[in-house]
Image (cartoon, rainbow, N blue to C red):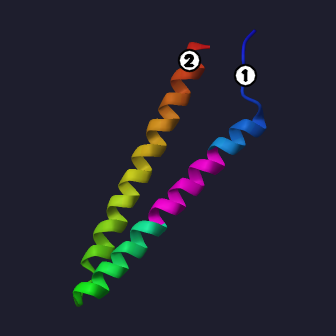
Amino acid sequence: MEKKNSPLATYYQYTSLGFQMVTLMGISMWLGLKLDRYCAYRFPVFLSTFSLLATILCTYGTIRKLLHQHKQQQQE
């Protein structure tokens, strides 16, 4: 018996992916702000760096998950 994803299960997968992205970006920005205030830099070095890294990680994770799902659909 084949197991097919229901539309609701697919919705939950993408919703959880969105929550992960928001959480990762929020934590990285909070940490960057705290470090910038602690170091008292005039330019927000840590905030900029952590925001950029979080964006790259979120994009990489999303693409990786989508490619994995596409590969599974190709095999069915």
Could you tell me if the residues under marks 2 and 1 are in contact, i.e. CB atoms within 8 Å?
no
SS type, badge 2:
helix
Q: Where residue 32 appears, x then y in whole percent?
A: 34, 75
64 displayed left or right of 48:
right
Sequence order check: which comes first, mark 2 or mark 1?
1
SS type, badge 1:
loop
Magenta residues (range): 14-25
The residue carrying pointer 1 sits among few (fewer than 14), some (14 to 19) or many (20 or more) residues within 10 Å by Cα, namely few
Q: Where residue 7 appears, x then y in whole percent?
A: 76, 35
In 3D space, how far apart are the residues under numbered discs 2 and 1 (Cα atoms)? 13 Å
- Per the image, the residue denoted by label 2 is 74
The quadrant in which residue 42 appears is bottom left
> Is residue 11 shown above or below 43?
above
Q: Which mark is residue 4?
A: 1
3 displayed left or right of 30:
right
The quadrant in which residue 70 appears is top right
For the C terminus, which image quadrant?
top right
Q: Where residue 71 appears, x then y in whole percent?
A: 51, 22
The residue depicted at 45 percent of the width and 41 percent of the height is 63
Q: What's the residue type where badge 2 is placed?
A: Gln
Asked if the stretch drawn in magenta spans residue 20, the answer is: yes
Q: From the viewer's perspective, is the residue at label 2 or at label 1 nearer?
A: 1
Q: What's the residue type where badge 1 is placed?
A: Lys
> Is residue 75 shown above or below 58?
above
The quadrant in which residue 39 appears is bottom left
Q: Where residue 12 appears, x then y in whole percent?
A: 69, 44
> Is residue 65 shown above or below 60?
above
The residue depicted at 36 percent of the width and 80 percent of the height is 33
> Is residue 20 shown above or below 52?
above
